[in-house]
Image (tube, rainbow, N blue to C red):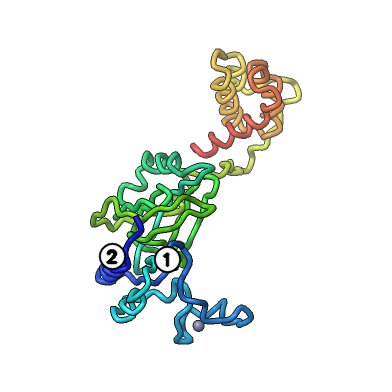
Amino acid sequence: MRAARKDLLRAALQYRDAGLGVFPCKPGAKVPAIPAAHERDDPARLTCRGECGRQGHGLYDATTVREVIEAWWRSIPYNIGIPTGLGTFDVLDVDKKPEGNGFAALNKLIAAGLVSGASALVRTRSGGLHLRFAGTDQGCHSLPRQFIDFKSGGGYVLAPPSWVDADDKGPAGAYELLDNRAGTARLDWSQVLAVLDPKPLQRPRRPGTTRALPADGTLPPGVRRALDGPAEDRSAALHRLVGACLRAGLGDDAIHELAAGYEPAVAKYGDRLRVEVDRSMARIGAER
Ligand SMILES: [Zn+2]
């Protein structure tokens, strides 16, 4: 339900009492309510964060001054904006959109133990979640394909009981506090990335590991054993072969050449064999 002006004012003052600066956003929307202090062609529009003394700098208008807050919410049911980052909190934003949602990603983060220290849980207007953590200066980041955003320094969020009307990004709905506890844990975005967006692993290049296959066809004993070993599980067999090759000091070209002649792997992977060999090498490199 759309919050009444006096409820928004009361909430804004409660945030203020908790030491959180607030600023007004347009009723029913997520954008700042106060018109920009600087015209479009004013160079200060990009750099001024309120040093000019006027209001109209978006999240930089946020204040804990009671009289200013009371004046803002005196007659208009503004939504409540709170800047994220140092001084307030960071937010892991789990989006819910018509084309998908971030709950699968959130479950991975839960399984990895990264989000158990959240200090508050807010339901967003679309049924997504805001998880609050200790404020830091990590900046804002986004994994759009996983419907996950991270709001830290330079960003802001709407706070309960703000209400957003239906628009092209979601249905109408209120922000609602689901859970609140005294938490001081921070969320390290690099750890989130490591769980949700692992980069292809790079095998460390070690000198002296670029040996080619011997011209006379004799193979290092470990590689021979891998080639002649069990291959019921063809993926495991290929991985063992790659491991034996790396231990024997063979170079990438030699390993690819051997794998291309290893019938179980060719039968299983076909034209994806090279990719699979690279992946196997990277995995082994990462384990070392
Ligand atoms: Zn200014």
Which residue type does callout 1 highlight? Pro
Nearer to us in this view, 5 or 37: 5
Nearer to us in this view, 56 or 119: 56
Q: Position of residue 129 (x, y in %)?
A: 39, 50
**Element at label 2:** helix
Who's the residue at 54% across and 38% down the image? 285
Horizontal side of 139 relative to 21 (left or right) equals: right
Judged from this view, the residue extending furthest toward the right is: 215
Q: Residues within 10 Å of mark 2 (few under 14, many from 20)?
A: some
Q: Quadrant of the N terminus?
A: bottom left
Judged from this view, the residue extending furthest toward the bottom is: 53
The residue under label 2 is: 7
Which residue type does callout 2 highlight? Asp
The residue under label 1 is: 27
Q: Is residue 1 above or below residue 230?
A: below
Q: Is residue 214 above or below residue 46?
A: above
Q: Is residue 32 above or below residue 175?
A: below
Who's the residue at 44% across and 75% down the image? 60
Q: State whether label 2 is within 8 Å of ligand 1.
A: no
User: Marks 2 and 1, Cα distance to the nearest angstrom?
Assistant: 13 Å
Compare marks 2 and 1 and give the one earlier in the sequence: 2
Q: Position of residue 113 (x, y in %)?
A: 35, 43
Q: Residues within 10 Å of mark 1 (few under 14, many from 20)?
A: many
